[in-house]
Amino acid sequence: MAVKGLFTKINEILFGAEVIKEYGGEVGGFRYMILYDIIRGEVISHFITPPKKYSRRVGGKVDALGYSVGAEYQSEYDYAETIAVVNKDAKLNLKPQELLSRVNENRLSRGEPEIKTTEIIELGRDEKFYAGRYIGKTNASSINRPEFDAHFDNLTPAVKSGLTLWLHFVTEIMYDVPVKQSKNKKVRNAVFRSAIFLPDMVKGQLKMHVSHNMEKHPDNMIAFPMDVGLVSYVYKNKKRTYTDVSASKPDTYGDLSSFHIWENLKSILAVPITDSNNVCLGILTIDTDQPYNVARFDEQGLNDMLTLVTTGIGRLLEAYI
């Protein structure tokens, strides 16, 4: 889901007869200074300063294979060197070094330190770049609220381990429903499975990254298209939802045949995972071989508790970003 940063105008810079507006803001811990040609309505360049207390990538061009150019930082200090992402298709043809020189003149006149870049990356107006776990657009559609998409192509073993513990808690402790079998009247626990889906914006998928009690099932580590199915609906709308899957139409899962789905699946509950800014980072799902009312998917109190769990998961992912 797109993150909308709140950027504000900082200053105006003169380039001959041209007036360029300077905007500043922060998204995902990354500091941005954007130069914007307000007459032509386009971004000229982004100056991006990543945190460097963790290893972060920034600047790499986004393509079908991931990214081709990037930079990694590792340090105990708060912020690293700045990366410049320049719109090479901008109608106002200004060289990157000329831009930086004029920006620094203005910063020094205001008593602010110079910006020192380690790399200048030139991208087309419709291309995208990485900034940590977000993907930004070279030419933002809104300079005041530019959009960045959350993106997870992989997770570290430590993060996967932490997420797996949350799933174990949800599946084995929160939802533990005994069910009477009609044939021998014995009591057994309903089968509950859980998973966490995260967005892969390069492939256009919501991909399962961790799961619990799904290892032997055909839909373990499945990926759904971004525009179909319950997982996609909850991701886009940030709305907790449960449904009777057995009553769903076959095309609910897009181009995935029913062969890929657990044959005993009857109901599913999906809850958005959000960060501290209420940005959706992914989806937690719980499904079962029981009707949703037997599974207690319609119980408000239990669902509210599950939302608290996903809040904790969101903070874990936010720290990872």
Image (cartoon, helix red, strand yellow):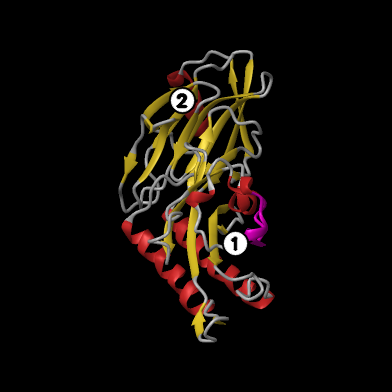
Q: Is residue 245 magenta?
A: yes
Residue 110 visible in the snapshot: no
* x and y percentages locating residue 1 in the rendered image: 59, 46
* Residue at screen point 42% across, 62% down: 214
Residue highlighted by disc 2: 100
Q: Along the horizontal axis of the image, is 235 left or right of 57?
A: right
Q: Amino acid at mark 1?
A: Val
Q: Position of residue 116 (x, y in %)?
A: 39, 33
Q: Residues within 10 Å of mark 2 (few under 14, many from 20)?
A: some
| Helix, strand or loop for disc 2 | helix
Q: Earlier in the sequence, mark 1 or mark 2?
A: 2
Q: Is residue 196 above or below residue 107?
A: below
Q: Residue at x 60, y 35 (%)?
A: 23
The answer to whether residue 216 is above or below residue 293 is above
Mark 1–mark 2 distance (CA, rounded to whole Å): 45 Å
User: Where does residue 93 sit, x and y in percent of width and height?
Assistant: 53, 13
- Which label is found at residue 271? 1
Indicate the quadrant where residue 37 lies: top right
**Which of the pair 12/164 is nearer the observer?**
164
Q: Position of residue 248 (x, y in %)?
A: 66, 54
Q: Residue at x 49, y 22 (%)?
A: 99
Q: Is residue 80 left or right of residue 252?
A: left
Relative side of 136 to 55, left or right: right
Is residue 300 something that shows in the picture? yes
